[in-house]
Image (cartoon, rainbow, N blue to C red):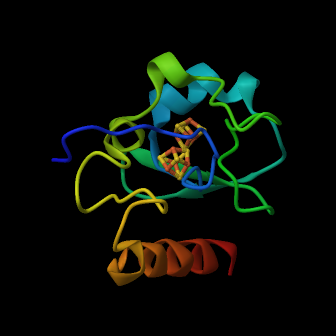
Amino acid sequence: MVDKFECEKCGQCCGPVPFTIPMFKRFKDKAQRDYILTPFSEIHVVPVAESGDCVFLDENNLCVIYKDRPKVCRLQGVIPKLPCPHDEGYEDSPYPKIYGQMIGDLLK
Ligand code: SF4
Ligand code: SF4
């Protein structure tokens, strides 16, 4: 865990993330852009937008479902495995590559 984390609200980490199907149904009307809905597991789906942004990121780089955002979003920048791109040592993290592969695979 990091001692203190100041999110700059740049939206850079808000790419496609998995949602449980009930959660996505609950919030899908708040989507900010068109997307392809892709199965991720038996209980999860990932909405993928052409821009690579999360469908719930608005034009001001704010999350429109912030209070209810998934756990993975709450951990971004807080645990070492989900580093903020502005963290020191970020380039050493494999995470961006994993993300890029995931997006590429989903769009095939
Ligand atoms: S966690 Fe980092 S990348 Fe994500 S919005 Fe905050 S400052 Fe930007
Ligand atoms: S749900 Fe919100 S916090 Fe999570 S990736 Fe999407 S816009 Fe970012």
The mark tally for this picture is 0
Q: Quadrant of the C terminus?
A: bottom right
Residue 97 lies left or right of residue 78; in this view the side is: right
Q: Residue at x 48, y 59 (%)?
A: 86
Locate residue 12: give its quadrant: bottom right
Which sits in the foreground, 25 or 5?
A: 5
Locate residue 73: give its quadrant: top left
Q: Position of residue 71 (x, y in %)?
A: 33, 36
Residue 34 lies left or right of residue 102; in this view the side is: right
Q: Position of residue 62 (x, y in %)?
A: 67, 31
Residue 68 lies left or right of residue 82; in this view the side is: right
Q: In this view, does 38 lie above or below 90?
A: above
Q: Where is residue 2 in the image (x, y as percent from the top left)?
A: 20, 47
Q: Residue at x 46, y 81 (%)?
A: 97
Which sits in the foreground, 12 or 47?
A: 12
Q: Residue at x 76, y 34 (%)?
A: 58
